Structures are given as C-alpha cells and as structure tokens.
C-alpha cells in the first residue's frame, strides 16, 4: 500500500478552510476527510439536551476513533467512517462511508491541528486565519441554508460557545501550523500559494507521482 501525503487544514468555523480543502482535493485529485463526522453520537439524549451540548469543545469529538482512522489512512489503508446528522446531533444509524486515502489525504476541521495524535501524521500543517466578523457571516449563511438553523439560534450559539471556544482552542492551534494562510484572500490566490509551498517542500512531486 502506498502511503499518501497527508495535509492538515485548520481554522475557525467560517474561516474558509473547508473551501480550501475541497478545492485543493479537486485540483490534485486528493481525498478530502472532514472531522465533523466524528462528533459523538448523542442519540441517548433528548433533542433538547443535545441542543445544549457544546459542539465547539474538542471533547465532543470521538478523538480516539478519529486518530485511529486517520492513522490507518496515513498508512495507506481503506476505512469506513461514520455519518453525522447535524440536524439531529446524532450519527446516522447503519450509515457508514468507505474512504480510500489515495495519493493525497487532506484532513479538514476546526480541531485538525489541536490533537497531537493527529499532527504526527501530517506532512504539512496549515492554519487559515480569518477575522471573526467574516467567520460569523459565513457561518450564519451555512447554518441557516444547510443545517436548518434560525438566525437567532446561530447568533446565540456563536456568542455563547463558538467564539469563546475558538479563542480557547482553535486560534491557539495555529502555533502548530507549518504555514498560516489569509482566509480573506481569493481562492485562486490561496491555491496558487499552497501549490508553491508544496512544490518547495518536495511534496507536490510526491503527490503527482501517482
């Protein structure tokens, strides 16, 4: 089994990290792996109780399973990962997704640089740095349009948990990044800069030699 080049892309919610990860995966025909599917299953709680949980604390992620699965993929193995339903805050029953690492594996999530167990697999750690007001506007659009939230609930959640947890856990994880990118610059410019970085480190050649 050929081992992939592994990149970790972190940043606050709404920073643009997922857009960057998706576009890079498209450009280089890589595998985009999102941490969000590893939120703990809260099916044992009532819906009201689930909604009160802090989804921006790293303890809400089943990190042991996450690190095990990423480790297997970093070794070139295929995995089956869970599917998470953001509307109900539960894992979808009997729903798992097959994922192959390929030649490039991109780990994407707010805590992608937080867990030491994940960082040891990366060939390159990337942090997308974006002003808080930009992050909020992007998150508002996403949660209302894609996750069935109301504007009021998004605003309350952002003020009470998202921003405080980002300041406590996400923004400090930038210290573990090999490069910090501006989340407000154009996507084309960001991809070009990242391609140059990969080329300079000899990683692009490894990715393309598939």
Image: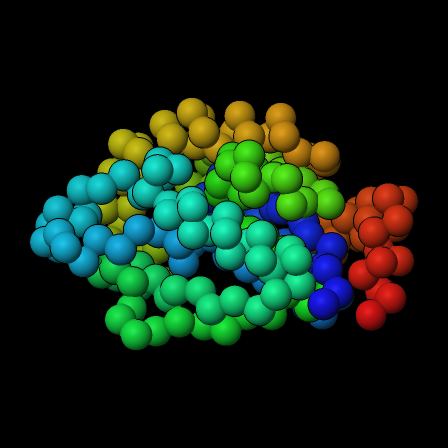
Instruction: Tell which of 128 and 122 is nearer to you.
Output: 122
Q: Is residue 104 above or below residue 39?
A: below
Q: Is residue 189 above or below residue 119?
A: below
**Horizontal and vertical percent position of residue 3:** 73, 60
Q: Is residue 136 above or below residue 25?
A: above
**Horizontal and vertical percent position of residue 136:** 42, 41
Say which quadrant the N terminus sits in.
Answer: bottom right
Residue depicted at 51% across the width and 36% down the height: 115
Say which quadrant the C terminus sits in.
Answer: bottom right
Relative to residue 16, is residue 43 drawn left or right?
A: left
Mark count: 0
Relative to residue 195, is residue 153 drawn left or right?
A: left
Residue 124 lies in quadrant: top right
Residue depicted at 61% across the width and 65% down the height: 77
Residue depicted at 25% across the width and 59% down the height: 90
Q: Is residue 129 above or below residue 36?
A: above
**Horizontal and vertical percent position of residue 144:** 32, 57
Residue 32 lies in quadrant: bottom right
Name the colouring of the figure. Answer: rainbow
Residue depicted at 42% across the width and 25% down the height: 168
> Could you tell me if residue 31 is visible in this image?
no
> Could you tell me if residue 75 is visible in this image?
yes
């Amino acid at each position: 089994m050929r081992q992939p080049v592994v990149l970790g892309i972190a940043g606050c919610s709404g920073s643009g990290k997922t857009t960057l990860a998706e576009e890079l995966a498209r450009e280089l025909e890589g595998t985009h792996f999102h941490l969000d599917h590893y939120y703990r299953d809260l099916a044992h709680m009532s819906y009201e109780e689930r909604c009160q949980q802090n989804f921006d604390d790293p303890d809400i992620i089943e990190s042991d399973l996450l690190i095990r699965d990423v480790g297997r993929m970093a070794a070139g193995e295929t995995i089956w990962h869970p599917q998470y339903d953001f509307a109900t805050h539960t894992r979808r029953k009997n729903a798992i997704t097959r994922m192959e690492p390929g030649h490039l594996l991109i780990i994407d999530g707010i805590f992608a640089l937080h867990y030491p167990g994940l960082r040891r697999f990366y060939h390159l750690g990337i942090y997308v740095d974006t002003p808080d007001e930009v992050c909020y506007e992007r998150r508002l659009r996403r949660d209302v349009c894609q996750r069935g939230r109301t504007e009021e609930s998004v605003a309350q959640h952002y003020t009470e948990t998202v921003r405080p947890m980002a300041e406590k856990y996400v923004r400090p994880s930038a210290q573990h990044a090999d490069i910090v990118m501006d989340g407000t610059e154009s996507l084309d410019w960001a991809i070009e800069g990242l391609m140059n970085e990969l080329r300079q480190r000899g990683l692009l050649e490894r990715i393309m030699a598939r």
